[in-house]
């Protein structure tokens, strides 16, 4: 917080920060899970949609790591139930299938997207793109994946098409892609160019513009590529979100609300008005 808001603001927020820390400590319990020494860093995490794997196995989450693996972990005990091996580089994003927690998809910095069976540990489908894969998302139908790689959004009907299709080009590097519960909507994050903040502070190259697009599922599942647009009618929701991939925000199950961190110091400088505190921290999409 002090780094983003500046040294002078740190003290103004001291009381609020202490209150937040105290509330978190009294109402929540934090516990570290032991991972193998080879695991290295943890990059992305996703929880099973219904909390359970087949055969009444425990509640689980999937996590990606610097040892190039995806791990399926019981979050009640911290026990690793499965380790998915095969990515050539660190997986940067992982998602559970929206209706069947037996399956996950992951994309790595080595340009590779994989679809896994977490019970057997086998990779069922695989494709390779031209750039690092930063974000993946399942369409609510479960048979199509959205992929952010380089400056393109790809869609992949993994059961029917061996090669993902380009659904959208951007002039900026993409940081996230996320299908909403509404099957006709997709949210895309595009990296902003470096912005030099006032008073000689450090330039920001981490902010992202989040744009909501209309999405045509028929384009993705058609047997032959169509001349119609897969994505259209863009609507900018936020111009300076702070995130490194889709792990930096979340959309409510109803599809109406977006939770995301933003660069308020940037917003304040551009608007040239005092920083205000709205009564509600939720906004309709």
Image (cartoon, helix red, strand yellow):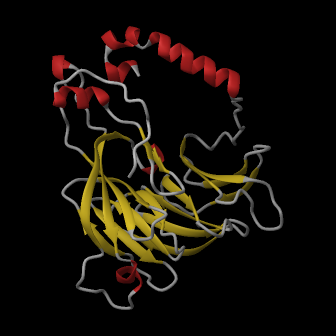
Between residue 120 and residue 26, name the one nearer to us.
Answer: 26
Q: Left or right? Give the position of 201 relative to 46.
A: left
Q: Position of residue 200 (x, y in %)?
A: 17, 18
Residue appearing at x 78%, y 44% in the figure: 76
Would residue 109 be seen by someone viewing this image from the given angle? yes
Residue 214, percent from left and from top = 32, 68
Single out the residue that lies furthest toward the bottom: 223
Nearest to the observer: residue 252 or residue 117 = 252
Using the rendered view, name the quadrant where residue 3 is placed. Answer: top left
Q: Is residue 155 above or below residue 150?
A: below
Q: Quadrant of residue 168?
A: bottom left
Q: Is residue 160 left or right of residue 177?
A: right
Q: In the rendered image, is residue 130 in sight?
A: no
Q: Is residue 246 left or right of residue 20?
A: left
Residue 267 higher or lower than 107, as above or below: above
Determine whether 73 is above or below 220 in the image: above
**What residue is drawn where x is 73% and y is 46%?**
75
Residue, far right: 56
Taking the image as shown, residue 259 lies to the left or right of residue 225, namely right
Count of residue discs: 0
| Vertical relation: 277 (above or below) 253 | above
Q: Nearer the viewer, residue 227 or 281?
A: 281
Q: Residue at x 40, y 49 (%)?
A: 284
Q: Quadrant of the N terminus?
A: top left
The residue shown at (34%, 82%) is 219
Q: Position of residue 282 (x, y in %)?
A: 44, 40
Residue 271 x, y percent position in the rendering: 18, 30
């Amino acid at each position: 917080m002090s780094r983003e808001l500046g040294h002078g603001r740190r003290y103004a927020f001291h009381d609020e920060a202490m209150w937040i820390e105290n509330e978190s400590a009294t109402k929540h319990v934090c516990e570290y899970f032991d991972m193998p020494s080879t695991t290295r860093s943890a990059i992305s995490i996703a929880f099973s949609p219904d909390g359970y794997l087949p055969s009444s196995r425990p509640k689980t989450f999937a996590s990606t790591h610097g040892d190039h693996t995806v791990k399926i972990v019981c979050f009640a005990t911290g026990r690793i139930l499965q380790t998915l091996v095969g990515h050539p580089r660190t997986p940067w994003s992982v998602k559970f299938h929206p209706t069947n927690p037996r399956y996950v998809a992951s994309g790595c910095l080595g340009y590779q997207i994989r679809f896994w069976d977490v019970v057997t540990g086998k990779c069922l489908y695989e494709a390779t793109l031209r750039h690092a894969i930063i974000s993946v998302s399942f369409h609510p139908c479960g048979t199509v994946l959205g992929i952010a790689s380089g400056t393109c959004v790809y869609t992949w009907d993994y059961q029917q098409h061996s090669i993902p299709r380009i659904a959208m080009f951007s002039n900026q590097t993409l940081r996230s892609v996320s299908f909403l519960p509404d099957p006709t909507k997709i949210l895309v994050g595009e990296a902003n160019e470096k912005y030099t903040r006032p008073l000689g502070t450090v330039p920001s190259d981490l902010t992202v513009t989040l744009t909501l697009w209309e999405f045509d599922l028929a384009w993705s599942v058609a047997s032959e590529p169509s001349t119609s647009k897969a994505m259209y009618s863009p609507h900018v929701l936020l111009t300076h979100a702070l995130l490194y991939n889709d792990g930096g925000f979340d959309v409510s199950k109803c599809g109406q609300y977006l939770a995301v961190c933003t660069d308020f110091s940037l917003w304040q400088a551009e608007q040239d008005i005092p920083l205000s505190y709205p009564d509600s921290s939720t906004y309709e999409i």
